[in-house]
Image: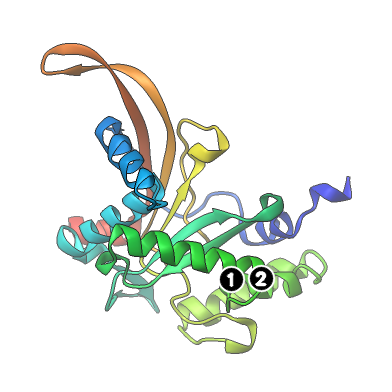
């Protein structure tokens, strides 16, 4: 059963605990029928774009244009505004290994630029060339439990609460950017609700579900459309600040 204790599961068992933080969850269904046709056309033209690329850019631009006040984080009890919109995309590598790729200034990228940049960063991940935030995970998993959890909490205090980078472990301040997005539809799931990544200071996490055909009302008529769920978990501390 040792194969169950993967590197990521060892990390997750240390950084995740029973829910205690205040969060807000929400979900919406989106008609992606026309969007999928558009993406199919782009792929026929040689552009290897996906729904993940599209929604990463949509969320990034919405954060810049519609709700810039959510592009912030908590540090030492204060709300700090970010200077740019950076997105972290959850990806699966070879052997079903989980990882993440950060797209700096995602709100300024075109769809083609985002697709190309994401492919390059995934390639660097696979070859071990990228200076990844999680490259320290392999080291930390060698630490016996429960000391592993103590180390992660110490890392969180240093890099997030105190905003002090640890370059030797590949742990800069503001490691994950403005938000994190993940597509669980690739795993065969229609919908899901995310957790706020414990060692990040993102204000929210977006989850893309699988695309399924459903009967919906279009112009007062029942039509079969391709629908996708989009769910979110928000840091209540940040949202409460905006609501107040």
- Relative vertical location of residue 110 with respect to residue 4 in this rendering, above or below: below
Left or right of 61? Residue 138 is right
Horizontal and vertical percent position of residue 53: 37, 53
Left or right of 120? Residue 3 is right
- Residue found at the far top of this picture: 222
Considering the numbered disc 1 on the image, is that residue within a helix, a strand or a loop? Answer: helix
Image quarter of residue 145:
bottom right
Left or right of 172? Residue 67 is left
Horizontal and vertical percent position of residue 108: 25, 69
| Label 1 Cα neighbours within 10 Å, binned few <14 / some 14-19 / many ≥20 | some
Q: Which residue is drawn at 47% across and 50% down?
A: 182
Q: Does the CB distance between marks 1 and 2 fall below 8 Å?
A: yes
Image quarter of residue 6:
bottom right
Left or right of 18? Residue 162 is left
Q: Can residue 225 be seen in this view?
A: yes
- Residue found at the far front of this picture: 45
Q: Residue at x 40, y 70 (%)?
A: 177
What is the quadrant of the N terminus in the image?
top right
Alpha carbons under labels 1 and 2: distance apart:
5 Å
Give the residue at mark 1.
124
The answer to which of 31 and 68 lies nearer the viewer is: 31
Give the residue at mark 2.
127
What is the quadrant of the C terminus in the image?
bottom left
Q: Residue at x 43, y 76 (%)?
A: 174
The answer to which of 221 and 64 lies nearer the viewer is: 221
Question: What is the total number of numbered labels drawn onto the structure image?
Answer: 2
Task: Please say which color scheme the image uses.
Answer: rainbow
| Label 2 Cα neighbours within 10 Å, binned few <14 / some 14-19 / many ≥20 | few
Circle on res. 178: none
- Relative vertical location of residue 131 with respect to residue 213 in this rendering, above or below: below
Horizontal and vertical percent position of residue 37: 30, 35
């Amino acid at each position: 059963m040792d194969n169950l204790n993967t590197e990521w599961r060892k990390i997750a068992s240390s950084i995740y605990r029973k829910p205690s933080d205040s969060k807000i969850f929400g979900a919406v269904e989106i008609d992606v029928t026309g969007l999928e046709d558009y993406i199919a056309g782009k792929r026929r033209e040689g552009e290897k774009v996906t729904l993940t690329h599209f929604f990463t850019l949509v969320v990034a631009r919405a954060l810049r244009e519609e709700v810039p006040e959510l592009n912030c984080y908590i540090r030492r009890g204060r709300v700090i505004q970010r200077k740019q919109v950076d997105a972290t995309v959850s990806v699966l590598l070879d052997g079903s290994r989980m990882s993440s790729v950060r797209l700096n200034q995602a709100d300024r990228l075109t769809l083609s630029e985002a697709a190309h940049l994401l492919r390059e960063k995934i390639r660097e991940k696979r070859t071990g060339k990228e200076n990844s935030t999680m490259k320290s995970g392999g080291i930390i998993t060698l630490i016996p439990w429960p000391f592993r959890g103590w180390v992660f909490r110490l890392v969180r205090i240093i890099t997030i609460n105190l905003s002090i980078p640890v370059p030797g472990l590949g742990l800069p301040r503001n490691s994950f950017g403005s938000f994190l997005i993940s597509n669980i539809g690739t795993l065969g799931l229609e919908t899901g609700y995310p957790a706020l990544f414990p060692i990040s200071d993102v204000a929210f996490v977006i989850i893309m579900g699988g695309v399924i055909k459903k009967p919906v009302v279009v112009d007062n008529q029942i039509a079969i459309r391709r629908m996708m769920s989009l769910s979110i978990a928000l840091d209540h501390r940040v949202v409460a600040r905006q609501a107040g």
